[in-house]
Amino acid sequence: MRRPRRSALPGFGLTLGLTLTWLSLIVLIPLAALVLRPWELGAAGVWQSLTDPRVLAALRLSFGAAALAAAINLPFGLLIAWVMTRYRFPGRRLADALIDMPLALPTAVAGISLTALFAPKGWIGALLVPLGVKVAYTPLGVLVALVFVGLPFVVRTLEPVMLDLPAEAEEAAATLGATRLQTLCRVVLPALAPSLLTGFAAALARGVGEYGSVIFIAGNMPMVSEIAPLLIVIRLEQFDYAGAAALGLAMLLLSFLLLLALNRGQHRLARHLA
Amino acid sequence: MTSVPMPSALTPPRLQRAVLILLAVTLMGVLLLLPLVVVFSEALSQGFETVVEALETEDARAAIELTLLVAAITVPLNTVCGMAAAWCLARFQFPGRTLLATLVELPFSVSPVISGLVWVLLFGANGWFGPWLDAHGVRIIFALPGLVLATTFVTFPFVARALIPLMRAQGPAEEEAALTLGANAAQVFWHVTLPNIRWALMYGVLLCNARAMGEFGAVAVVSGHIRGQTLTMPLYVEALFNDYDWVGAFTVAALLSLLALVTLGLRVLLERHMDHGRGAA
């Protein structure tokens, strides 16, 4: 694949030129502004702007809630992917289409409908009131929204791998007298571990930057339920462009480093299995 | 998903199987279906006339028209460029190809808010080009061009992403054969490439359009929230919701949900076509 191959096909220069132009205008030049503008504050200014307690609280909430939501989505995704790939049941096709609902539903719509569901008078919120659990307008609301948004990433990562699991390994385990639970824990789950990590990373990445589905249900109390993307918006409204860019750049770099680490872990797991 | 014959040794006891299915379906019902049901139930809570009224206001009309306009500009631009990107990335080997492929997908890993922020950094009042634009009376931020640019950023990768795996799998053999037989570049494109990729292309355009019409975070940053002027439908939902116009917000949300449902339905159909195409290849 590496060997350069001379192609007889036309249009290379034209399409490459168009792609590079469009990519530069729409993606690269704007992102360059994000990388360059924070430094108007000077390095010390950037540091000060990022270590503001309100910023730290927002970053902690955005990354913490996204990680927790991704972790919750692992058993959820495992269950759904397992049932979807192993069993037939009436309504299965409908359920399959439904899994992509969080990706298809505009985030603002998801935001207000989750708020309506989990508000104290909502269908689910009313059931939680007697238990003393408040979801809407608390950090718990952020978590609920991120679980909703991240679920398809875990399910869709697991499904193809589950379909490809060699049945022989499970049969062998069963033949050797393993119970179903043992087979699941010793044979199936280890084989799924790398893709569980991939799904976790994808859900996490989405959750960290998520805005529309979160801000309605979060209540947006500074230091308590205010997510980092919202703080960017607030800084822009105060015309603090450099501060907004600093926070945006920090978020991008943090998620990038996190994904890099998870990617390494995933490679190590995959190698360990092979 | 295609059906897999189940090995007999692995067939679980009936009860266990029923419990698992019940759990999964309940989970999907609560987490995925209920939010959708709530939207329609709240929209219709005051009767059907209220729904019609909410959609007939001037602001609602303006929001619908603006949403359609932004999508009508963004989607064709990104379709053409996505096809160009797919052609050079799937059909040629060149240094930096992997890097370019990664960069094309980059907007997917950027927070929507940042996708809007970058445009404000360039063209906002304190932006690099802000003072110049101001002096020449050109408005980008808090106006249509800003909405278009933010939406274009967010929907940039959809078409290329749908096309590249398919075009790589198909390989260049048919196009090369057409060239050998004397076809020119345009003929190869219209008679060989386009028919081969049409379902995947429609798939990419469909997802691109759904995101363009439903985008919230990126456009929220550049919109300025001027009623009747810079509110797309998702932003209008937010404005109504913040005004405690509950039914109005859910009515517009229901319209957007219908768009999502149609998109999902068409997507299932297209996926079936694409599976057939791949099976035949």
Image (cartoon, rainbow, N blue to C red):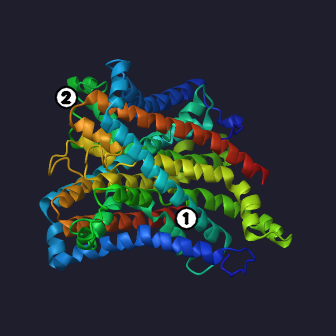
Vertical relation: B259 (above or below) A161: above
* Residue A98 image position (x, y, % from top left): 51, 36
Vertical relation: A27 (above or below) A183: below
- Mark count: 2
Q: Which chain letter matches label 2?
A: A
| Residue hosting label 2 | A132
Residue A19, by quadrant, is: bottom right
Q: Residue at x 25, y 65 (%)?
A: B124
Q: Quadrant of the C terminus of chain A?
A: bottom right
User: Identity of the amino acid at label 2?
Assistant: Gly
Q: Nearer the viewer, residue A59 or B85?
A: B85
| Residue hosting label 1 | B81
For mark 1, does the 10 Å Cα neighbourhood hold few (<14), some (14 to 19), or many (20 or more) residues? many
* Left or right: where B39 falls relative to A61: right
Same chain assignment for discs 2 and 1: no
Q: Residue at x 44, y 40 (%)?
A: A76
